[in-house]
Image (spheres, rainbow, N blue to C red):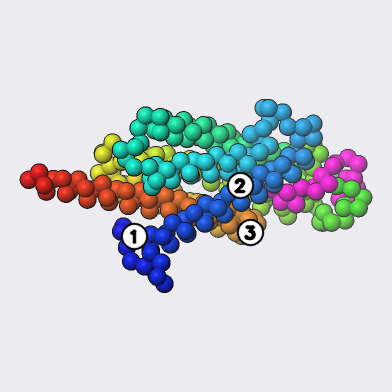
Amino acid sequence: MALSGSYFGVKTSTLYQLLKYSIYVIIFYNVIYFTLEDYNSSAHRFREGVGFRDFYDAFPQAIDSISWFILLLMLELETWIINDEDHKGLVKWSINGVAGICYFFILLAFLGYSQKIFFMMGFEQASFATACDAVGSYLSYLIELDEFAALSAQTCTSVGPAPYYVNEANQIIMIGSLLFDSYLLAFTETTNAATWILVVLVLWIDVYLQFRGELTDRLFRINAYIKIGLYSILIIAAIIWGIYGNFMDFWDAFIWIAAFFFIELNLLQWHEETEAQAHADRESAS
């Protein structure tokens, strides 16, 4: 994949870099957004405060987003910025060390997402007729999966119509029409997190074999087919967020897919350059 030519007097390679790093900047903004969303949500789900053992459950989006963003930068270093001959010693082990820490927190975030399913399973149908009847017994109401508001005499009329469901452990109520959407979004988040772990695992295999000079065209194609299947699942998750979630969830999913598309392009160009060099070496040797 040669980045040659130009558009409007600007080199294609320069446009490629500008677009790629613009997406990385957008992702950084999204990291801040989801960190604040988790912070606001934790005030309703953890009444007694967030303890050390509750941290990954309270801040799964923040942990996930920060870890993936740092991991994205490590992959950018390995697949684009650092030359093959420089990927050794302290540089190699520093990147691997940071990536390893990111993988650990990504797994923690996955556990946090899975806890949302159990959180939703804690809701049972309530007997009261109006949300105002629940004031004093319950403290919050669910607006959507990660968004809550305080339940009071002033806000109870905004909750929505019966039937209602209650989570006794967290003192939260929700309207019945949100039950299916919230369950679906909880499962979607968990499936999405698991799929991303598999994507980066296959990508890591590509990078590892590429550095060892063992990534043959056949292996590259096999891994590409596997990743196409995984990215298809991620696209389906993004569509579900677009239909049942909010725009920010859909937008973030789309941006992350775009970011890893650039990592895949980095890897493709790296592989092509390595194969071309190997072919030239064989030609000169013969």
Q: Which mark identifies residue 3?
A: 1
- Residue that lies at the very extreme toward the left in this rendered image: 286
* Vertical position of residue 221 compared to residue 137: above or below: below
Residue found at x 47% / y 59%: 19
Q: Is residue 232 visible?
A: no
Q: Amino acid at mark 1?
A: Leu
Query: Could you say which quadrant of the image residue 54 lies in?
Result: top right
Tell how many labels. 3
135 inside magenta stretch: yes
Query: Could you say which quadrant of the image residue 193 lies in?
Result: top right
Front position in the image: 101 or 25 = 25
Asked whether, in this view, residue 236 is left or right of residue 135, the answer is left
Q: Which mark identifies residue 247?
A: 3
Q: Which residues are magenta?
A: 128-150
Asked whether, in this view, residue 85 is left or right of residue 95, the answer is left
Residue found at x 81% / y 56%: 160
Mark 1 surroundings: few (<14), some (14-19) or many (≥20) residues within 10 A: few
Mark 1 and mark 3 lie on one chain; the one further toward the N terminus is: 1
What's the CA distance linking mark 2 and mark 1?
A: 30 Å
Front position in the image: 177 or 102 = 102
What's the CA distance linking mark 1 and mark 3?
A: 33 Å
**Element at label 3:** helix
Q: Amino acid at mark 2?
A: Val
Mark 2 and mark 1 lie on one chain; the one further toward the N terminus is: 1
